[in-house]
Image: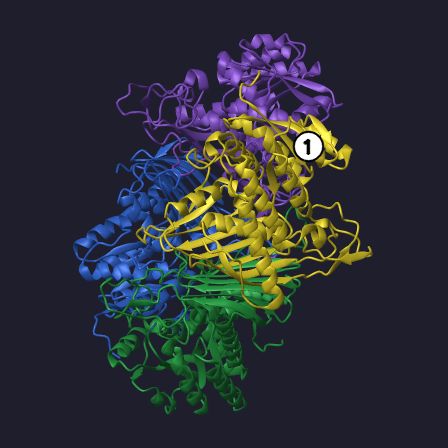
Chain colours: A blue, B green, C yellow, D purple
Amino acid sequence: MSDTRPDLGIGMVGYAFMGAAHSQAWRTAPAFFDLPAVPRLRAVCGRNEDAAGDVARRFGWESVETDWHALLTRDDIDVIDICTPGNTHAEIAIAALEAGKHVLCEKPLANTVEEAEAMAAAATAAAKRGVRAMVGFTYRRTPAVAFARQLVASGRLGTIRHVRGQYLQDWLSDENAPLSWRLDKSLAGSGALGDIGAHIIDMAQFVTGDSIASVSGLLETFVETRPLGGQHATLGGHASQDAERGPVTVDDAAAFTARFVGGAIGVFEATRFATGRKNALRLEINGTAGSLAFNFEDMNVLEFFDATEDPSIAGFRRILVTEATHPYVAAWWPPGHGLGYEHGFTHQVVDLVTDIAKGADPAPSFADGLAVQRVLAAVEASAADGTTHTTGATS
Amino acid sequence: MSDTRPDLGIGMVGYAFMGAAHSQAWRTAPAFFDLPAVPRLRAVCGRNEDAAGDVARRFGWESVETDWHALLTRDDIDVIDICTPGNTHAEIAIAALEAGKHVLCEKPLANTVEEAEAMAAAATAAAKRGVRAMVGFTYRRTPAVAFARQLVASGRLGTIRHVRGQYLQDWLSDENAPLSWRLDKSLAGSGALGDIGAHIIDMAQFVTGDSIASVSGLLETFVETRPLGGQHATLGGHASQDAERGPVTVDDAAAFTARFVGGAIGVFEATRFATGRKNALRLEINGTAGSLAFNFEDMNVLEFFDATEDPSIAGFRRILVTEATHPYVAAWWPPGHGLGYEHGFTHQVVDLVTDIAKGADPAPSFADGLAVQRVLAAVEASAADGTTHTTGATS
Amino acid sequence: MSDTRPDLGIGMVGYAFMGAAHSQAWRTAPAFFDLPAVPRLRAVCGRNEDAAGDVARRFGWESVETDWHALLTRDDIDVIDICTPGNTHAEIAIAALEAGKHVLCEKPLANTVEEAEAMAAAATAAAKRGVRAMVGFTYRRTPAVAFARQLVASGRLGTIRHVRGQYLQDWLSDENAPLSWRLDKSLAGSGALGDIGAHIIDMAQFVTGDSIASVSGLLETFVETRPLGGQHATLGGHASQDAERGPVTVDDAAAFTARFVGGAIGVFEATRFATGRKNALRLEINGTAGSLAFNFEDMNVLEFFDATEDPSIAGFRRILVTEATHPYVAAWWPPGHGLGYEHGFTHQVVDLVTDIAKGADPAPSFADGLAVQRVLAAVEASAADGTTHTTGATS
Amino acid sequence: MSDTRPDLGIGMVGYAFMGAAHSQAWRTAPAFFDLPAVPRLRAVCGRNEDAAGDVARRFGWESVETDWHALLTRDDIDVIDICTPGNTHAEIAIAALEAGKHVLCEKPLANTVEEAEAMAAAATAAAKRGVRAMVGFTYRRTPAVAFARQLVASGRLGTIRHVRGQYLQDWLSDENAPLSWRLDKSLAGSGALGDIGAHIIDMAQFVTGDSIASVSGLLETFVETRPLGGQHATLGGHASQDAERGPVTVDDAAAFTARFVGGAIGVFEATRFATGRKNALRLEINGTAGSLAFNFEDMNVLEFFDATEDPSIAGFRRILVTEATHPYVAAWWPPGHGLGYEHGFTHQVVDLVTDIAKGADPAPSFADGLAVQRVLAAVEASAADGTTHTTGATS
């Protein structure tokens, strides 16, 4: 059953949690969506050949590489998909773009503003040569979030006054949860702030179409040492109290107030200590004409309040974002048959492949990723000196 | 990247809505789960070769057949997956079982009790030869539903008093939604009762571990004629009011009270006219020690009330059924990262492949499907004569 | 601070749970509403003079009587408010009406259809003399319910297809909860059916503006004997397992399907065994143009789905029924400041006093109470013989 | 029906929104609760004699005064209840305390820290003479909030990590809502910050049992001028766009991050511009052993997550705080029969009268009110200079 659509060769670096999500997306997208090109899973790259081989076998990657440089020289690979920790992003992405490969890079774009600036510059240069770069703020592709953006853009919220963003998890609440690479500043850059705070910052800026101009905030590390031995731990777990402990060098939680360029004010929070909140990526926006509320724990729903209606009949509507008229949904199931976490990755593939095929720059761009990085840096600076910091954003 | 696990050849009959769900499941299951055998998508069968070919190309089926009999003679096919309308189930399933093929048959098992009885007998006979049969009540494999069954089985609800089951949709509420095969008694057997009522009956019997002994109910056809031309319509749509109309020969809605063998009483409802309810498969169970509530529109959640707790602190808990300790979940994502509609089909494949490999009879069996069929028939008989009817179930 | 509005003398019979609710209502109504007359709490009547005296002192009743006949001869009393068990309603109400007193009678109107017919006839006769009668289905006066009625009456739901009514409590789930007068058929008439089922039947008929034409149902007594000694128990409690036990002579739960005169179908349930449901008086209505859902446990909210909207933006709205434009609300607090259970009684007083002053017949009338009684009787007859029974309603 | 309990004479200053709530509370408390003394509504005081007289007639106040000084010299008055704008609180309260009258003062305690300090000092001095003072943070007396405090105090939340407090309303979202006294800094002191932010600050400190040590925040006035002529407007309304406009001199919204003395971090927000949020006083607390969530728009519910449970069964429970074992509830209705906004005022009366009778100092004290005032002042200072400010709290 041959497919007449052109091939698009994919090489993926990294193969853990994000690797599985990306692998499933690359092969699912062309089954459900009419793509202009068919992603081919050419190679997965990891230093541990056995582990990478297992991912290859499960998801159908054609080959395994153990050095990412090898991907850049292969003619059958068009896209480099970067799923490694943040400290490696800049080197790989810049090299790939320079080698003429399109790049999909997991978030946060980098661990520092400097790296992110270099990456954004590389992406701008590459775009002139028709080479595309996208950063993986995949929650944008949740249908309810994409639809939220449409509602704001069409004016249904009027002038935005308030943005309330939270990303709440609880997998570090146990003080004996082990130390992992995500708690090591040299690898992860920051803690809750960069890992999950980055998502809610991007989502807020995406849905509002506005940018954070200044912030005032704080960072907190509630548990300063943790049991060693969990370098491979992904999320959670529990170690013996007697285990040797090492220092946590990142924040456990971040909180900040913000002013947007357009005049709205915001309140943001990211934590891994909110017991009972498992993946509560929550966004609430109040405008003069209406309000929105979203919670990823209930990801197929968008709540919308229309403030222009007769007050007797107005109320937050629980919109099931499962209609064929909603973003991405027509390719899937009938109304009321919800989607799950990994569908956002499939939609990311759909958008990236479509943009590559038509020669358009995808969003979120590396510049968008840099903008988020600048907010993160401003929060860190504000937390350090107790004053308000600007991000440099002017529009 | 070869896989050392043995192959299990799959031949699928039918390729529409259910065909897509099943195709994705066959190829996703071995990626996320450690299966004892790897399903191979050998052939998809459909009378329309082009349409079947499109499904084959999208999902990776190796070949296309246009006559289902051909699947039964192919040595590379071990399992026949039946995704066609109910009037064809008996013939295909019985022939497949007799040909030594394992069978997965979509629900409802058949359009009549007589057909279902013949199928159940064929399955019993086949089991003696090591050939397995399963009916596709896939909602059982929603983690929240499977977990609900565990809670009841472990005694957390005590003696069950009340079962409240509803399957509410609204895609026929528009009186100009077109006539489709689902509204033709000769093809579909019944309307809301068999199509969606069957699901809530199976779910109620599965979760409680009990059987419906008698029913008293009514059927209603609110819109007696509909525009022709929608034979290919799946769900919903809207035709011109001027279109020629044909008769709806099935029920639009069904409602019945029930008594369970174990003493509980039940209230059930199935309809495609509940405006605003898109796929509200709702089950609520009250026992002496606790209660459960589930709604497929919020499929990653199970509500549980523990009646043995201090009343001050007791309340319905909204359990996010996304923990690694919940059924099927460990293979997927971290807590709070929900699953979607099609995951149940993947879980169905996991369970079926596992049972085939270990030589066990899978559930729900054709006998379970027959039991549901007998409840459907009792409801129809009760609706016809206005009296209570028994189902024959005694345990 | 004298009030220039005329007086309306009240005499109340009974002083328990309902007596407190009514007392508070009589004195609160003129404080918050502009009534055409001011209720004066002339006398509370109870056989236990001390207990009645305590109620009098707490709520400001001017006197105590121990024989209800005495109230009928007092010139300073205009209204007889009957808060006693159902077996006494007919005698007191008919005598009061014949004595020229307006009557407010708690629900259910009576314990039998025969009594209710006599009461309705007495009310009709009295109305010709300007004497008014009202039955206390007070949940009609919850603002959300009154607003639901307005929405249906204004056509916002279109043609009604489905009515889903439940009244779920759990205070008898404990098999050692003591026997009380509510479980004695000679005093209470029936169990869950008449005590709480009557409310959901009335609410369904009120909100739809339609009548139940036929029913098919079942009754169940899960716990057939209970510890004696709880005659004074109101709701719940727990006795020793060793206590002497007496027979429960009423139903613990009732369930029935229904057909309405206007073509809708209904499913109803009343129980005191739904663990975790404390006062879940739930009504859901689906019409061609929209749907409604209400739950008394969240009594300040009405959910409404507008099926005429663009499907992308449609969803059940959670309307906070606390706007000044909602029924009864303008007299109370600003938006979002909810009301509680007893406010419905205050609204009942407001409507009754207003109708008496303007010479109008109040609703729900004794005829409305009789209609509910006929549905209760049809359910009992259906449960007894397993067939469908009609109620006699034709409009 | 005389009452043998001693009298407690009440004199109330002010008679608007708060006056109605207080009046109803004074007379309802002794009806439902066994109080050690019976409040007697001796006099209501207002400069507008007719308006005050109307309130007196409706609620049963025995007399009307037009100068609050008169209340202080009346022997039949024991308690001065201050319901006037914040700029008058200090003068009246201090004079009353010095005159030996117990004082109940509406919140915020004062418009400045200086005034609040003087009041707290006066209260301390008065307490030595057996004269009591309480500030009216009435939301503490919502049963769900009082129960939340009990849960935290009993250790069910473990060590508190996060406090998330919001008070969201929307009645000023319309830019043509008229200018009222609440928008005039000279009368109201501040805007959303003091009027509603004060409530959420007090609630957070009350429930956690901890104090805010430092804050970093911002204030915003979205609409800088408004139509004149609404001095008597309470909440909301809409004026002509052509009306003459005057300046809004207070904040429309406030947001701040906070550190608590005990190590928790907090995020707070108060606004009257959150369209669709009518009275969303929301508090969420995450501790190492559990979490709580409350929203006044659903005031009879407390959500609780027990983090010590098996993760499979853990979930936020929706506790209906309507059990007899919950604070204040036993005096009211059976489980599931909710309370409303004004019940908190009744509970305030109950606690105050009880404390006066037993010679105890009531809470929240004027010192508690001063603590809130200091947080408000720190937020204002932080908003003015963009740096973090401390409150002075050390325990």
- Say which of C343 and A219 sits in front: C343
| Left or right of B166, for residue D275 | left
Residue at (49, 45) in percent of width and height? A252
Whether A79 is drawn above or below D200: the answer is below
- Say which of B185 and A291 sits in front: B185
Residue at (43, 74) in percent of width and height? B30
Q: Amino acid at mark 1?
A: Leu
**Horizontal and vertical percent for residue C361?**
50, 38
Residue at (61, 68) in percent of width and height? C385
Residue at (58, 29) in percent of width and height? C28
Q: Quadrant of the N terminus of chain C?
A: top right
**Horizontal and vertical percent for residue C263?**
42, 59
Mark 1 — residue? C71
**Horizontal and vertical percent for residue D122?**
62, 14
| Left or right of D359, for residue D235 | left
Q: Chain of mark 1?
A: C
Q: In the structure shown, which secondary structural element does the residue marked by tag 1 occupy? A: helix
The quadrant in which residue A209 appears is top left
- On the question of residue A141 being in view, the answer is yes
The quadrant in which residue B162 appears is bottom right
**Horizontal and vertical percent for residue C147?**
44, 42
- On the question of residue A233 being in view, the answer is no
